[in-house]
Amino acid sequence: MKVVLSELTKHFPAPKKKGEVVAVDHFSFEIPDGSLIGLLGPSGCGKSTTLNMICGLQKPTSGKIFFGEKDVTDLPPEKRGVGMVFQNYALYPHLTVLDNILFPLENLKGKEKLKKEEKMERALTCARLVQIEGLLDRRPAELSGGQQQRVAIARALVKMPGVLLLDEPLSNLDARLRLQTREEIRRIQKETGITTVFVTHDQEEAMSISDCIVVMKEGVAQQIGAPQQVYDDPANLFVAKFLGTPPINVFEGRVEKGRLYIGNEDVLSVSGAEDGKVFVGIRPEGFVPDEKGTFTCTLKGVEVMGRDVSIVAQHPLCGSGAIRAIVSSEQGRAVDLSSSSVRFRLKSEKVFLFDGESQERIRVK
């Protein structure tokens, strides 16, 4: 099912202050049928509020929500045909896994009411889909966190929803289980073809399983696009800094006559950029160790990560405490650890310029 958000806005009263807090600000976006969309951003950016408005748990201050061609803005949650998976799973502790999955079907009335055999068939189908068919007689307390998450997903799917909404579904799991479960979520979404909205603050999660990501800040969508496209072509400094592990390295620089300077070093040609102060973002994979390189940093050490090596360095114009350059193990071994400095050649496609005031992207040729 296609979901369309049109100028969606949500205000909350500001505690102990006059005025209001704008949680979501004129957000417009079309979610294609059968896609998995990641709403991504730091705490307080408005992503969960957006999800709750899609679900119907919160009413927009203004704007419209459409499921297909139907305006559902004023419909209660139970009439929207959505499945919701919460961060804390929200399973009923006194019910078995099977009864938890069946629970949404017990309240169906009228034409939607199912026979007992139909309910059981649906529940077993969903249990098999999330691979918990051997746990149906257990109660939530007897399950691991990952198993509880699967039960919550099965319970959301048993209603055969048109839209599946996942609110920080992996935040309570350990690192290895998070990786496994996010792969399962993607598999389930592909098999069912259900339009899915996945809310997370973890950019790695969002980028790994989403068809499209929406990066949000203070209620405003900063950039929308395919994960790799947004990573490779950030619209502003916020997006560039938010995406990537290790994060992008940011320097103070300046443009003079089509050349980019960091400190006194002429590091790159930036034809088309106007003269002035800029922020320079360099992805960790944008550094190439080179004795004849144009960019010099203070060498602090080398961290071996197996296939790759992280060169740790410092520079007085870098906004963070340490610079991390990710290079191949062969390149890492060539670095002279006895030296106090390291020189780099920069990959132009991994270097981004941002306006020194607005922090918006500056396009160069």
Image: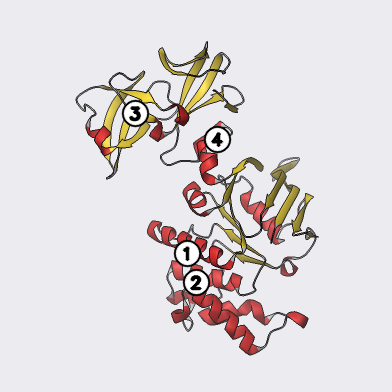
The residue to which callout 4 is attached is 234
Residue at 65%, 79% (x, y): give it: 105
The residue to which callout 1 is attached is 184
Which corner quadrant holds the C terminus? top right
Q: What element carries label 4?
A: loop
Mark 4: amino acid: Pro
Mark 2, other Cα within 10 Å: few <14 / some 14–19 / many ≥20: many
The residue mark sitting in front, 1 or 3, is 3
Q: Nearer the viewer, residue 305 or 330?
A: 330
Q: Do the residues labelled 1 and 3 touch (CB within 8 Å)?
A: no
Comes first in the chain, label 1 or label 3: 1
Which corner quadrant holds the N terminus? bottom right
Q: What is the C-alpha distance between the residues marked 2 and 1?
A: 8 Å
Q: Is mark 1 on a helix, strand or loop?
A: helix
Q: Can residue 12 be seen in this view?
A: yes
Residue at 62%, 79% (x, y): give it: 103
Position of 262 compared to 3: left or right?
left
Q: What is the C-alpha distance between the residues marked 1 and 3?
A: 37 Å
Mark 4, other Cα within 10 Å: few <14 / some 14–19 / many ≥20: many
Mark 3, other Cα within 10 Å: few <14 / some 14–19 / many ≥20: many
Rendered image: mark on residue 288: 3
Mark 3: amino acid: Val
Comes first in the chain, label 4 or label 3: 4
Q: What is the C-alpha distance between the residues marked 4 and 2?
A: 35 Å
Q: Give residue 158's position: percent from left, percent from top.
A: 61, 75
Q: Give residue 203's position: percent from left, percent from top.
A: 50, 47
The residue to which callout 2 is attached is 130
